[in-house]
Structures are given as C-alpha cells and as structure tokens.
Image: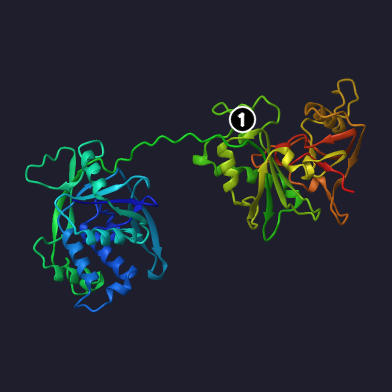
Amino acid sequence: MIAIRMRFLTGRFHATPWGHHVNEGAVEYPPSVWRLMRSLVATFYRVFPERAHQDEGDNLAVTQLKRIVAALSSPPEFYLPNAVVAHTRHYDQDNKGVKFFDTFVGVNPEDEMLWIWRDADLREEDHAALAELLGALGTFGRAESWCEAKLLSAEDDDALLAKMDGEQGINSRPLAANTNLAGLETMRLLLPDANADADKLFKTLLTETAKMRKGKQLEPTGTRWVTYTRPSDIFKPRRVRKPKRPETKRYTVARFALSSEVLPLVTEALPMAEMARFAVSSRRADESYSLALAGKTEGEGKPLREDHAHAHFWATDEDADGRLDHLTVYAPREFDADDVDALGRVRVVKRHYKNLPDVRLVLLGMGGRDDFAHVPVFRTARRWRSVTPFSLPRYASRGGGKRARPRDLPEAQLRRELRLHGLPEPVSVMPLDGYRTGDRREVRWLEFQTRRFKGEQGYGLAGFEVEFAEETAGPLALGFGCHFGLGLFEPVRD
C-alpha cells in the first residue's frame, strides 16, 4: 500500500480542474492524480537538477521516477477534510481591467488529506525517493497553495488501515456500478491511462500545458477521466469552538508616537482623539463590544457606574512646538484581551474631518501607570497648567438679581471637578488666556476645536494654572470631553 498525508499550511488549495476556465469558479477537490504526477516531476527537475540531466541511457534517477509514476497511475482513495469554497478578485490593468476570479478550497491548516493506493507497492529505494520528493514539494496546485506532504511508513500504514472504517474513514473513491449515491455527489478527475506506455507517459508529463493548447490538444496524451464520489456536504464548514484566550497581563496604558507629513495642530486634540478611538475600536476582533473603549453598557447603552474608569484618549504636544506628537490611551478599568490585541494592531488614524494626510501610530509600549511615570500626564507635581481648554460641563452664571441662579463661574466648576475626581483642594487657581508653546507663542482657547463629531460641546472654555499644597499625581483631565483630550493638565514646565 502507498499512503500520502498532505496538509495546506495557509489553509488554501488553489487548483482549477483540467478543461475549465479560472473564471468558472470550479475547484478540484479531491485533487487529480495527474496534478500530483506533474508536481512530482517538476519538483524532481527543480530540486535535483544534477540527477535529472545525467545521460539518458543510464540515468537511474529518471528510471526510478518513471517507476514511481507508474505505481501511482492507478486510481487512489481519499480522506478529504471538510472545506469551504471561496474566491478573490483581481483586475488586469494591462488588459483593459479584465476581472479574474481566483477560486480556491479553504481548509483548516491543521486538517490532513490522505491519498491511499491499496494495491500499489514500491521498492525500498523507490519508497525513499518518493519520500524525498514529497518532502521537497513545497506547493501543490498554484504557487499560493503551500503544502506539507509526507509518505507514510509501513507502521503508519497499519495504523491508517485500522482507522479507515472509523470516524476518519475514506470519503472519496472511484464510482462503482453498485454505488449508492445517497448523500454523495460526483466529479471527474484526470488520471493516466492504465495501459499507457511508461516512457510515453513520462514524456507527456514533461510537456508544457501551453504547448498542448497551442496544438489544440484538449486532453494530454495517455490520460483518461475517472468519476469520483465525495460527500455532498463536503463544503459545509464545521463550527469550530474558539479556544479560550489564556490569561494575559492586564494593561491600563498604551503609548503611541505620531508620525505624518503634516502633524496635527494642538487645536485638533479633540478630533484626533475621537478618530483614534474609532481606529482602535474597528481593529477589535469582529468589531466586538468593548466596555473599556465604549464607556457604556452593551445593549442599553447606559454610562458605566464607575466614574471615568473607561478609556481616555489624550493627544499631546510633548516637545512644545504647537503640533501633536504623542497619543496616550488610559483606562483605569483595564483593557481586555481583545482591546490589547486591537491596540497592538492599529497602525493609522485617518483624518476624515479634514483633507489632510493620515497620521501613523507607532506603538511605544503598553503597561500600567507606574510603567509610564515619565510621561507628563502621569507625573507628580504641585503646579499644573492647562494644555487644552477646560470645557465647562455646566452653564456659567454670574449670579445677582432676585431670581438668578447661584454663582457657578468657571473656577467654581473646576474646583467641583477636582473634588469629583478625588483630587485635593487647590491652594491657588490662576486663569490662563491660552496654551503657551516653547517659543512663547500663545494659542487662545477659542482656537481649539471643542465640538465633538456628533455635535455635543461644553458651555464655555477656560484655562488655569492650579497649585496644590503637596505633590499631586496625575492624570488631571477635567470637564466636558476629558476622555477625548479636553481639560487636560500637565506639570508646569521649568
């Protein structure tokens, strides 16, 4: 008995049956013996050229290959793993944009296909030569079909025979006269003629397909068609339970450097943060729901009860040149495994809100807050200064008059926000007119974009320098839009 085990490393088998055009969407499953023979001959001449080009009269390697081809000429039986049929589309721009379908069989890369010749046999040296050829095969079908093929040993053959009538039994074989076709379907495979001369058959295997077509030859010389059966539900995909993710380290911070032909201005901190959040969310597996990124319960969409524990996206200007150069994503409730995967795979933020170049994200690292103690927003300091405007969460009122509301000026709202975030009462609060860059240029708060994409905005803008009695650890992000970069404070630069 001869038995070959084969699996496709990328999960794809690209092969169009003989006589069909690629755009017909037909697939060859099971593969034809003729395809296997041509692949073995091609591998022989590609991998062992020194053996192939010896004198024809006493070329023992070629003679040995002819014996192998003759032994494999009889119709085999198959075990075919369940698969799916899929395709990709390609457009030939050099040929007026003609469209081509590349149809392929998709299989689980871990599943194995078995070829079995019950009545065939090989000499010991031929068995070793076939094993060597299969080990060097590399691809089977078109070049995209990376494969791993192995010739089973005698011990493997005995174990295989014991399994043939079990769960992994033969499910594709030549159609016999008394075959019950219930639950089966048929297809034709190209095989060598049983009575073909070995030398003529080998010569045909060396003939290029293009030469046959040029000679208007519909079928290779010395071949025949054999009808095979296979299960009618062979292309019904199996449900595979997704393995549970192993426990991974929990992260609360992800840091990115920003790169672009034109970096965003500091005034674009809010839209940049919103687009970054969208980019990360869209990279999650199957765009599944994330509590840390959304900040709302799934289904009802209610805000999470824990205050400000979901993700903050802060785009910052850390070299004080007036342009954003870093992105910090911080979620006190910790990112789940899918969040970590999405943060690791996000590469670019598309600036849909303006006709400007995209911003590339370079991941600098992920970890806990202590791992990023050097980052300005996580430092410890007594004096903190606004780097983005504090957007008032409530209407400001100056008070006065008989029916006026109590005073709720920007400074009072800032102090309330500090208390709500569990921060100490400041000893002094000094208003600021704008953001000061390294060259002393001042960007007024009114120049910042403070309206979110869905139309929401706060009730006025202000900026402050806050001083505490003792060293206070960041982050300080307060007021409306604090999860998207507004109301952000950094330690006062010396």
Of 376 and 206, the residue lying toward us:
206
Residue 173 appears in view: yes
Residue at (55%, 38%) from the top-left corner? 338
Above or below, 397 relative to 327: above
Task: Name the image quarter holding residue 289.
Answer: top right
Task: Name the image quarter holding residue 49.
Answer: bottom left
Please provide percent x and percent y for residue 198.
14, 67
Please indicate whether residue 284 sits to the left or right of residue 460 in the image. left
Please provide percent x and percent y for residue 367.
67, 41
Extreme-front residue of the structure = 124
> What residue is pinned by disc 1?
296
Residue at (88%, 43%) from the top-left corner? 432
Q: Which colour scheme is used?
A: rainbow
Extreme-top residue of the structure = 402
Of 225 and 407, the residue lying toward us:
225
Please provide percent x and percent y for residue 161.
21, 42
Above or below, 52 relative to 301: below
Residue 20 appears in view: no
Name the kind of residue labelled 1 in the image.
Answer: Lys
Above or below, 480 relative to 175: above
Could you tell me which secondary element the residue under label 1 belongs to?
loop
Above or below, 476 relative to 349: above
Task: Name the image quarter holding residue 369.
Answer: top right
